[in-house]
Amino acid sequence: MAKGQQKKSRENRKPKQEKAKTNASNPSTKPGSIKELENMRNS
């Protein structure tokens, strides 16, 4: 066989599971964080 045609004996790896990316542009949805932002605006 030619160099580039050698059969690979190595098993293919499974693709990594994609993580749900959190959108950095979205404000945090944790309760209480919105109140803190309101307090900062008012002062």
Image (spheres, rainbow, N blue to C red):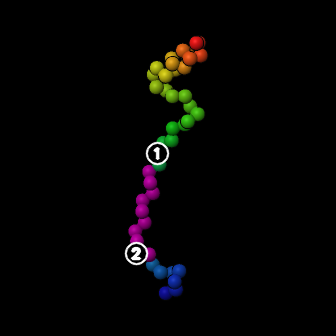
Residue 16 occupies quadrant: bottom left
- Circles 2 and 1, Cβ within 8 Å, touching? The answer is no
Determine the residue located farthest toward the bottom in the rendered image.
1
Residue 10 inside the magenta-drawn segment:
yes
Examine the residues drawn in magenta and state their main secondary structure: loop
Tell me the residue at 54%/15% (across/down): 39
Tell me the residue at 51%/41% (across/down): 21
* Image spot of residue 35 (x, y percent): 51, 17
Q: Is residue 39 placed above or below 26 in the rendered structure?
A: above
User: Disc 2 versus disc 1: distance between alpha carbons?
Assistant: 30 Å
Q: Is residue 18 left or right of residue 25?
A: left
Residue type at numbered disc 2: Ser
* Image spot of residue 6 (x, y percent): 47, 81
Would you call the spot at circle 2 few (<14 residues within 10 Å), some (14-19), or many (20 or more)?
A: few
Q: Earlier in the sequence, mark 2 or mark 1?
A: 2
Q: Is residue 18 placed above or below 1 in the rendered structure?
A: above
Q: Secondary structure at mark 1?
A: loop
For label 2, the residue is 9
* Image spot of residue 11 (x, y percent): 40, 68
Residue 37 occupies quadrant: top right
Residue type at numbered disc 1: Lys
Q: Is residue 25 placed above or below 39 in the rendered structure?
A: below
For label 1, the residue is 19
Quadrant in which the C terminus is drawn: top right
Question: Looking at this view, is 29 or 36 the one in front?
Answer: 36
Would you call the spot at circle 1 few (<14 residues within 10 Å), some (14-19), or many (20 or more)?
A: few
Residues rendered magenta in the picture: 8-17
Residue 14 inside the magenta-drawn segment:
yes
In the drawing, what numbered circle is on residue 28?
none
Tell me the residue at 49%/87% (across/down): 1
Question: Looking at this view, is 8 or 30 the one in front?
Answer: 30
Question: Looking at this view, is 39 or 9 the one in front?
Answer: 39
